[in-house]
Image (cartoon, helix red, strand yellow):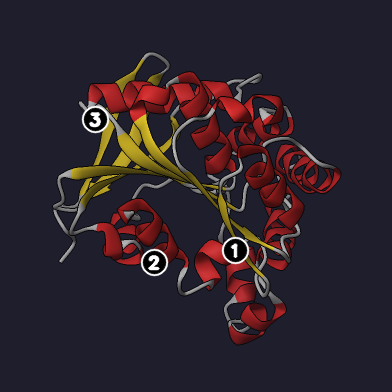
Amino acid sequence: MFYGLIEGSVSIPSGKENYISFGRGKKNLVIIQGLNVRDLAGSGASLANMYKIFAKEYRVYFFDRRLVVKEGLSINDLAEDIYHAMKELKIESADVLGISQGGMIGMTLALEHPEVVNKLVLGVTSSRPNETLKNVVGKWANCARNKDYITINKDSLELLYTQEYLKKYRFLMPLVVRLVKPADFDRFAILSSSILNFDCYDRLNEIKCPVLVLGGKRDRITTGKASEEIAEKLGCEIYMYDEYGHAAYDEAKDFNKRVYDFLAK
């Protein structure tokens, strides 16, 4: 049922990194999720179900962030972690799907280690900080340093999802706001800050692998314009969801199918 699910950890130069893998295919797919208040531990079954469309043709890998983070951590550091984790697991190359902060890591991986990235899909991400992104993520980082997880949760839910989605699940929202709490506030603040210092826009034309950009025109975190400027700079394929924002990867029922179809070309 869970497609050979494994939840494990791998040794990398910076220490340890947890990962989840599933699927019975011969190809490799690395999925890099966005900034989250929780790590991946214990979410293997739900992720395998959410991304089951890939399980037949791929061995899918989700890599978490390194276990120990320190001030000054960069997106480049996180990309290097994934590169070393891939090498440790003998993954010579893979298709890569990066979402939000994961897209930043994916772009960096393709720039610094192009030989390990076959195709790249960038979901609701940005190649450089814009004013909207700096204001939103900067606020989250400050809230984390003040241990104010209530504001982080309220703010992120409001900005991630459409009003239609929030109304549909409004009975759950008070529970989510109160119960979802970072295990380590400093960790969340450091990972948030890495986004604010990321800028690879001027190097985007160095990415030579096929790229698909998926964005949301109603994105109030990275902005839809950020997705559009990546595609314009790369001259690559893009699809923008008119009706969704930053959580298009969650709300749009065809998001994974679009990724699958692009990778299958």
Say whether residue 68 is visible.
no
The Cα–Cα distance between marks 1 and 3, rounded to whole angstroms, is 29 Å
Label number found at residue 257:
2
Q: Give the residue type at disc 2.
A: Lys
Callout 1 environment at 10 Å: few (<14), some (14 to 19), or many (20+)?
A: many
Q: Is residue 56 left or right of residue 63?
A: left
Along the polypeptide, which appears first: circle 2 or circle 3?
Answer: 3
Identify the residue position indicated by label 1 in the image: 247
Residue at image point 33% right, 54% down: 265
Residue 194 lies in what quarter of the image? top right
Whether pointer 1 and pointer 3 mark residues with C-beta atoms closer than 8 Å, the reply is no
Question: Which dot, 2 or 3, sits closer to the camera?
Answer: 2
Which quarter of the rendered picture does the N terminus lie within? bottom left
Point out the residue furthest to the top here.
13
Residue at image point 38% right, 13% down: 13
Q: Is residue 157 left or right of residue 85?
A: right
Q: Give the residue type at disc 3.
A: Ile
Residue 32 lies in what quarter of the image? top left
